[in-house]
């Protein structure tokens, strides 16, 4: 109730509105910008004031955590394979960040944190050198986008954040809220099986632009298939999902470096 349309990022809004009018010229082409935002539940009218919805704030707000401090992502890099191992007697983490902002910005900041704290192998193929990271960037992006899009945003869950935990042997993503609707562990990645807890948010993110081009999600129920395919191409083990009534997690096992590769650390020393 304290938010106004001024709490939304104008550059993201303009890109979103432009794309919606391009996609649906007959329905939205002649609508005013404010009408488009109202129709797509980016904002709601509160008497004579336009106020962002939670979906609008999370997708395109300047600083959603101003209103919901825990609707963020925490990134932690642990030195070992458990949370109890320490770097030394004074440090428990190699890196720890509280990542804030709208969903497009949080996804990019998580990717930067993972890159900073992992290795990139170099494979020589003929006359060319190919960089092969511990975790495929596109698979990590998809996993984080899915976590933020499908997490539980109900009042009871707004005190819990999305977590991305990097261990010596794996990368783990954890979000509040288990799988929704008809989707189960067994049907993840199966064509034609899709269900969205946050329908308006999913629809908004489909045309929310990244600053460097493209859009946040495809919203076609193919996210998990994309993760599996990217890991397969990197010759990595399949993802390991776990589901409960209150949370969902996905784990990527670290890519094994081939003896023919050289490796460099992504960490900034």
Image: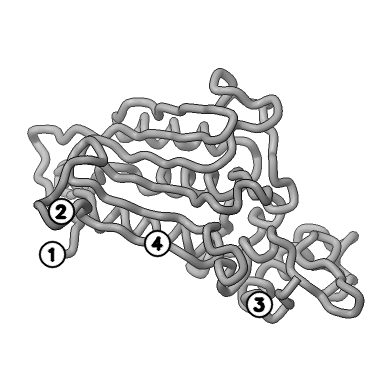
- Up the image or down, 3 lies above or below 41; here it is below
Residue 50 placed where, x, y %? Answer: 81, 75
Q: CA distance from mark 2 to mark 4?
A: 22 Å
Mark 3 or 2 closer to N-term? 3
Q: Are marks 4 and 1 in contact (CB under 8 Å)?
A: no
Q: CA distance from mark 1 to mark 3?
A: 36 Å
Q: Nearer the viewer, residue 32 or 85?
A: 85
**Extreme-top residue of the structure:** 186
Few, some or many residues within 10 Å of mark 1 (<14, 14–19, 20+): few
Q: Which residue is mark 1?
A: 269
Q: Are marks 3 and 4 in contact (CB under 8 Å)?
A: no
Q: Secondary structure at mark 3?
A: helix
Q: CA distance from mark 3 to mark 4?
A: 21 Å
Few, some or many residues within 10 Å of mark 2 (<14, 14–19, 20+): some
Q: Which residue is mark 4?
A: 98
Mark 3 or 4 closer to N-term? 3
Few, some or many residues within 10 Å of mark 4 (<14, 14–19, 20+): some
Residue 61 placed where, x, y %? Answer: 62, 70
Q: Which residue is mark 2?
A: 265
Instruction: Report whether 200 appears left or right of 153.
Output: right
Numbered badge on residue 97: none
Instruction: Report whether 41 appears left or right of 255.
Output: right
Q: Secondary structure at mark 2?
A: strand
Q: Looking at the image, which residue is at 54% across and 38% down?
A: 223
Q: Are marks 3 and 2 in contact (CB under 8 Å)?
A: no
- Up the image or down, 190 lies above or below 62; here it is above
Numbered badge on residue 7: 3
């Amino acid at each position: 109730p304290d938010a106004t349309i001024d709490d939304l990022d104008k550059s993201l809004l303009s890109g979103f509105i432009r794309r919606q009018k391009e996609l649906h010229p007959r329905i939205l082409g002649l609508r005013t910008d404010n009408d488009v935002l109202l129709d797509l539940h980016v904002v709601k009218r509160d008497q004579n004031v336009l106020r962002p919805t939670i979906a609008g704030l999370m997708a395109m707000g300047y600083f959603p955590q101003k209103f919901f401090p825990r609707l963020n992502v925490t990134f932690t890099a642990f030195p070992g394979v458990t949370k109890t191992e320490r770097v030394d007697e004074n440090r428990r983490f190699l890196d720890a960040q509280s990542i804030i902002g709208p969903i497009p910005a949080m996804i990019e900041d998580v990717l930067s944190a993972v890159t900073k704290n992992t290795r990139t192998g170099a494979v020589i193929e003929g006359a060319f050198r190919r960089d092969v990271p511990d975790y495929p960037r596109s698979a990590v992006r998809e996993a984080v986008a899915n976590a933020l899009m499908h997490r539980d945003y109900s009042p009871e869950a707004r005190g819990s954040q999305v977590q991305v935990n990097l261990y010596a042997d794996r990368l783990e993503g954890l979000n509040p809220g288990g799988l929704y609707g008809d989707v189960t562990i067994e049907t993840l990645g199966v064509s034609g099986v899709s269900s969205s807890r946050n329908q308006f948010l999913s629809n908004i993110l489909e045309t929310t632009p990244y600053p460097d081009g493209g859009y946040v999600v495809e919203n076609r129920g193919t996210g998990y298939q994309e993760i599996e395919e990217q890991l397969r191409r990197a010759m990595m083990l399949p993802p390991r999902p776990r589901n409960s009534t209150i949370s969902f997690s996905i784990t990527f096992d670290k890519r094994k470096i081939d003896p023919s590769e050289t490796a460099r650390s992504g960490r900034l020393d």
